[in-house]
Image (cartoon, coloured by chain):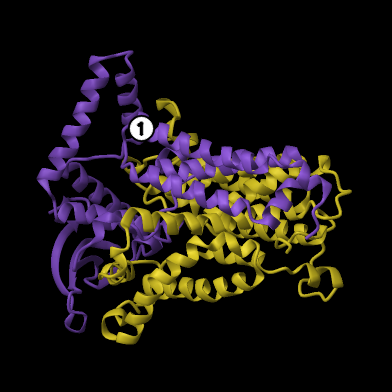
Chain colours: A yellow, B purple
C-alpha cells in the first residue's frame, strides 16, 4: 500500500508551487488591503506575536496607509519572484514573513477565522522544502523527494479537519447532536449581513427534508473530519471522504455563508494528477521551466 | 510491501513517535497547568490527539514513508507540526497566530432556542432607505472577520449583562493585584503571563458603545467615498429574533435597537 503522491514527479511539485503561490498572488492583488487604514485604530487588537509585541511607539504602524501599501507591493513582488524562480529560497522566506503579517493584520480587526490558513501553511511547508531540496539524496527509488512537501501540505489540511472534529467531540460532547444546536448555527450564521448571502438558511426551518439532511449530516461530518488523515493511506476512503466533505462545504456555504475556499483550492492534492502531467495529456499546459 | 533492511534499522520508530506524542501532551499539560488559564478539557483533548497521532503513525505505509525520509527535512517538519499541534491545544490564537486552535462549530455559549441576528440599515441624505453590508466596505475583513465581531459587539450592548461584566472585571483586577503584590514570585509571573498572553479584551458598556459608533462611522465614511452624490445621514441597527423551538412556526420579530445620526453618536 502506497501513500498518496509517494512517486510525485518534479512537474507535479512545480505545478503545485505555481498553484499555491499563484493563488496568493491573485488574492493579494485583488484584496483592498489599504482600506484598512480607514478602520478605527481603537479596534485594532493585533493577532500574532509578530504584531502583538511591537513596542508602543510603533504599535500602530502596521495599520497605517504607507505600511499597508508597502506590504501589498512587497507581497506581490516576493510572491511573483517565487513564481518566476528568482532567488526562490529567500523570496519564499520573505513571502512567508509578509503573508504572516498580512494575515495577522486582517484578523487584528475582528474574529480570528480559519479560511486562508491551510494555504498559508502550504507556503511555510514549501519554503522549508526549498531550503532542503538540494541536500536531499535522490537515489531513493521508493520515495520521490517531491512527495514530501505535497504530503506535508495534505497532512496539514487533514489534521485541521481532524483537530476540529476531536475538539467538537471532546469539548461539547454528544448532546449537541441531539438538540437544536445545528439549527441555531445555521440560522445565526445564515442571517449575518455577509458580502454574499444565499438566503437559504430559512429552509432549515421550513423544509423538513433539508433539516433532516443537515441534522443527520452533522455527526457524520464530525466522524469524517476526525478520520481525515486516513485519506493519505486509503484511496477508497479518500473518495468516500470527498463524497461527504464536498457536499458539506457546499452546504455550509449556501446555508451559512461560510466559504472555505482555500481548503477547496488544496483539494487538488487529493488527486494523483502525476499521471496527467507526466504522460503529456495536457490538462494543464503550463511551462514550469522558470521554477 | 517489502520489508527493507532500512525498515529493520528503525525498530526505535514506535518509541520515537511515542515520545513525540508524549512530549506534545506534556507540554500542553504544563502550559495549561502553569497558567491555570483554561479548562482542563483541553488537556484531555491533547491526550486524544496524541493517541490518534500515535496510532496513525504506526500504519505500515506511513511508517515506511517516514522512515525513508531524509533526516534534515524530517527535523524541520517535526518542529513545524509540533508547534501546529501544541498551539491547537493551548488555544491562545491572538498570541500564537498563525498557529491557531482549530475550533469550529463548537462554541459553548450557543445553546439557545432564540436566535438573534442584526440588520444594518441606513438612510441617505435624499431620504432613501438602504441595507448596509458592512463587509462590502472593508472587503479585507470579509468572510466573517468583520461581521462576526460586529454582531457580537452589538449583542453585548443590546443584551448587556452587568453581573457577567462585573465578574470579568473582578477576575482581571485580581490578576493585576497579584502581579503588583508579589513581584518576582512565580505567582506574579503567572499573573503577568495570563494578563499579557491569555488576556482577551474586556470593555465597559460605554467603551463598547463608543467602538460601535466608530465602526459605523468608518463604514459610513467608506460608503460616502463611493457615493459622494448621496451620502449617509444615519445608520440603524435592527435586531431580529427567531424562536427555533417550533421550526414550522418560526417567524422573525424585529425591533429597532440602535440609531446613529452620523457624527453625533448613537442612542
Q: Quadrant of the N terminus of chain A?
A: bottom right
Q: Say which quarter of the image contains residue B74.
A: top right
Q: Is residue B119 left or right of residue B87?
A: left
For this rendering, which residue is in front, A14 or A193? A14
Asked if residue A220 is positioned above or below residue A150 in the image, the reply reads: below
Question: Residue B85, can we see it?
Answer: yes
Q: Say which quarter of the image contains residue A184.
A: bottom left
For this rendering, which residue is in front, B229 or A271? A271
SS of the residue at dot 1?
Answer: helix
* Residue name at image x 33 percent, y 41 percent: B40
Q: Position of residue B144 (x, y in %)?
A: 39, 60
* Chain for disc number 1: B
Q: Position of residue B176 (x, y in %)?
A: 24, 24
Asked if residue B109 is positioned above or below residue B206 in the image, the reply reads: below
In the orientation shown, which residue stands out farthest toward the left?
Answer: B163
Asked if residue A180 is positioned above or below residue A87 in the image, the reply reads: below
Write down the residue under mark 1: B33
Amino acid at each position: 500500500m502506497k501513500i498518496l503522491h509517494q512517486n510525485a514527479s518534479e512537474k507535479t511539485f512545480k505545478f503545485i508551487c505555481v498553484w499555491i503561490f499563484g493563488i496568493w498572488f491573485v488574492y493579494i492583488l485583488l484584496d483592498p488591503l489599504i482600506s484598512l487604514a480607514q478602520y478605527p485604530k481603537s479596534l485594532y487588537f493585533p493577532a500574532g506575536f509578530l504584531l502583538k509585541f511591537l513596542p508602543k511607539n510603533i504599535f500602530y504602524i502596521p495599520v497605517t496607509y504607507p505600511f499597508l501599501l508597502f506590504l501589498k507591493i512587497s507581497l506581490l513582488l516576493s510572491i511573483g519572484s517565487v513564481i518566476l524562480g528568482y532567488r526562490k529560497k529567500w523570496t519564499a522566506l520573505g513571502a512567508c514573513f509578509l503573508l504572516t503579517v498580512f494575515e495577522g493584520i486582517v484578523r487584528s480587526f475582528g474574529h480570528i477565522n480559519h479560511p486562508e490558513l491551510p494555504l498559508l501553511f502550504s507556503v511555510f511547508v514549501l519554503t522549508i522544502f526549498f531550503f532542503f531540496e538540494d541536500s536531499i539524496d535522490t537515489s531513493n527509488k521508493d520515495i520521490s523527494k517531491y512527495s514530501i512537501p505535497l504530503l506535508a501540505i495534505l497532512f496539514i489540511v487533514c489534521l485541521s479537519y481532524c483537530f476540529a472534529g476531536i475538539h467538537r467531540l471532546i469539548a461539547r460532547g454528544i448532546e449537541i447532536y441531539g438538540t437544536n444546536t445545528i439549527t441555531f448555527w445555521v440560522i445565526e450564521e445564515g442571517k449575518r449581513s455577509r458580502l454574499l448571502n444565499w438566503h437559504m438558511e430559512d429552509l432549515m426551518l421550513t423544509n423538513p427534508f433539508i433539516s433532516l439532511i443537515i441534522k443527520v449530516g452533522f455527526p457524520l461530518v464530525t466522524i469524517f473530519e476526525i478520520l481525515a488523515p486516513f485519506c493519505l493511506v486509503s484511496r477508497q476512503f479518500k473518495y468516500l471522504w470527498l463524497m461527504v466533505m464536498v457536499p458539506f462545504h457546499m452546504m455550509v456555504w449556501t446555508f451559512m455563508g461560510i466559504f472555505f475556499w482555500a481548503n477547496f483550492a488544496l483539494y487538488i492534492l487529493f488527486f494523483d494528477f502525476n499521471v496527467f502531467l507526466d504522460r503529456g495529456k495536457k490538462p494543464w499546459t503550463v511551462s514550469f521551466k522558470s521554477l | 510491501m517489502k520489508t527493507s533492511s532500512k525498515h529493520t534499522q528503525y525498530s526505535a520508530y514506535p518509541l520515537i513517535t511515542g515520545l513525540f506524542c508524549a512530549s506534545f501532551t506534556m507540554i500542553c499539560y504544563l502550559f495549561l497547568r502553569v497558567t491555570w488559564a483554561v479548562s482542563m478539557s483541553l488537556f484531555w483533548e491533547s491526550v486524544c490527539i496524541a493517541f490518534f497521532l500515535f496510532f496513525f503513525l504506526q500504519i505500515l505505509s506511513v511508517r515506511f514513508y517516514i522512515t525513508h525520509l531524509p533526516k534534515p527535512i524530517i527535523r524541520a517538519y517535526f518542529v513545524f507540526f509540533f508547534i501546529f499541534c501544541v498551539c491547537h491545544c493551548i488555544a491562545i490564537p491572538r498570541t500564537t497566530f498563525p498557529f491557531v486552535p482549530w475550533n469550529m462549530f463548537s462554541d459553548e455559549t450557543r445553546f439557545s432556542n432564540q436566535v438573534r441576528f442584526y440588520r444594518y440599515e441606513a438612510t441617505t441624505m435624499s431620504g432613501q432607505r438602504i441595507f448596509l453590508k458592512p463587509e462590502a466596505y472593508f472587503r479585507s475583513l470579509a468572510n466573517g472577520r468583520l461581521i462576526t465581531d460586529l454582531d457580537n459587539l452589538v449583542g453585548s450592548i443590546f443584551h448587556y449583562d452587568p453581573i457577567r461584566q462585573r465578574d470579568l472585571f473582578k477576575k482581571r483586577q485580581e490578576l493585576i493585584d497579584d502581579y503588583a503584590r508579589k513581584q518576582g514570585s512565580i505567582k506574579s509571573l503567572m499573573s503577568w503571563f495570563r494578563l499579557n498572553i491569555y488576556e482577551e479584551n474586556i470593555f465597559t458598556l460605554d467603551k463598547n458603545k463608543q467602538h460601535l459608533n466608530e465602526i459605523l462611522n468608518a463604514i459610513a465614511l467608506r460608503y460616502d467615498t463611493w457615493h459622494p452624490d448621496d451620502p449617509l445621514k444615519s445608520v440603524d441597527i435592527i435586531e431580529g429574533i427567531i424562536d427555533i423551538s417550533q421550526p414550522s412556526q418560526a417567524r422573525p420579530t424585529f425591533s429597532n435597537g440602535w440609531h446613529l445620526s452620523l457624527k453625533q453618536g448613537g442612542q
